[in-house]
Image (cartoon, rainbow, N blue to C red):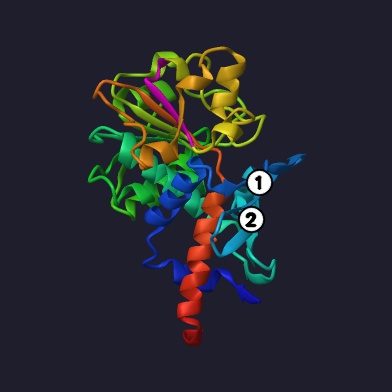
Amino acid sequence: MEILDKSKILDLLKGLNLESLISEGFIAYSNKLTVIPPVGELLFENPPGDVHIKYGYIRNEKYYVIKLASGFPNNQDLGLTNSQGMMLLFEQKTGVPVSILLDDGYLTDIRTAVAGQICAKVLSNRIDTIGIIGTGIQARLQLQYLRDITTCRDVLVWGRNVEHSKDFQSKMKEYGFNVSISSSVHNLSSKSNLIILATSSSEPLLFKEDLKPGTHITAIGADTHLKREIGPGVLKQASIVITDSLKQCIDRGEISHALKEDSIIRENIVELGKILDLSHPGRTKKEEITIADLTGVAVQDLKIAGGIFEKYLGRKNEF
């Protein structure tokens, strides 16, 4: 069994076509070629945090994965990253463990950022201004991964902590973005036609009066039953609502809240894999509002872990 530490993982990520790999995973998932059990979860109160256990496989492929990933928002005050964890990779036909990827939760952050990139690519209009709600590692990665799909470098950011917003502004300047700090979410949404929500909020931040025609919204923060970033009636305004997993979104995320409030019907929800394999057209008019609610699916973990391990095997003698 090979143990890959974070330094090796970072090296192996270079040049890996993550957009293609993860898109393949979403397509396989939406075409019922996967076995993905319900998410295992631990929730903590003091300090707040959560641990997710995700696992599964694609039929007739080489590996299955078990992933443990945590998010502890207060870690940044301790000089630690919010995300922690690891991925375990096994042979699908024998159960033999082949690799432990000691990524400190980094691969979960990366595959989530790539999913946001994919949604923006296939659902957005031409991007004029990017609105980022949140200032943590995922907010930063979401913005970084947009560089490959848009020439837009004008960004508005809103966060609860002004110092964190200033830090975000400074760090994103290094990646070529012109970041301004917004006074409110409403101000941000009035000037942005791509909005990314990347917080651990348990109370809504974006409301229906904030929406304007032609906007695409990707919400990634609400990955537990208790989290919520989007207010009542917002999803009802969308021409199309996309999710990574229909089964999972009924139980958690923004869609689960909207279903409980009867502000969306299940038949109006489309899985991302169906957009990617062209079974569904996605956005059809410029003025439409589109919303993607992503809670993270194990097939993403499988694809990124498997891709890294296969590249490692090809370069094994270099390490």
What is the spatial separation of the Cα atoms under label 2 and label 1, in whole angstroms? 8 Å
Q: Which image quadrant is residue 191 in?
A: top left
Describe residue 256's horizontal placement relative to residue 42 as left or right. left
The x, y position of residue 37, in whole percent, is: 67, 44
Return the disc, 2 or 1, that comes first in the chain's sequence: 1
- Considering depth in this image, is 161 or 224 the residue closer to the camera? 224
User: Which residue sits at x=56%, y=12%?
Assistant: 262
Q: Which image quadrant is residue 252 in?
A: top right
Residue 244 is one of the magenta-drawn residues: no
User: Which residue sits at x=55%, y=43%?
Assistant: 296
The x, y position of residue 285, in whole percent, is: 25, 23
User: Which residue sits at x=40%, y=30%?
Assistant: 217
Residue 242 is one of the magenta-drawn residues: yes
Q: Is residue 299 visible to the viewer in this orientation of the structure? A: yes
Describe residue 287's horizontal placement relative to residue 20 as left or right. left
Circle 1 residues within 10 Å: few <14, some 14–19, many ≥20: some
Report which residue position mark 1 lands on.
Answer: 72
Judged by depth in the image, the label closer to the viewer, 2 or 1, is: 2
Q: How many marks?
A: 2
Report which residue position mark 2 lands on.
Answer: 84
Which numbered marker is on residue 23?
A: none
Q: Is residue 108 visible to the viewer in this orientation of the structure? A: no
Q: Is residue 174 above or below residue 217?
A: below
Q: Quadrant of the N terminus?
A: bottom right
The x, y position of residue 245, in whole percent, is: 54, 37
Contact flag, marks 2 and 1 (Cβ < 8 Å): yes
Q: Amino acid at mark 2?
A: Gln
**Magenta extent:** 237-243
Circle 2 residues within 10 Å: few <14, some 14–19, many ≥20: many
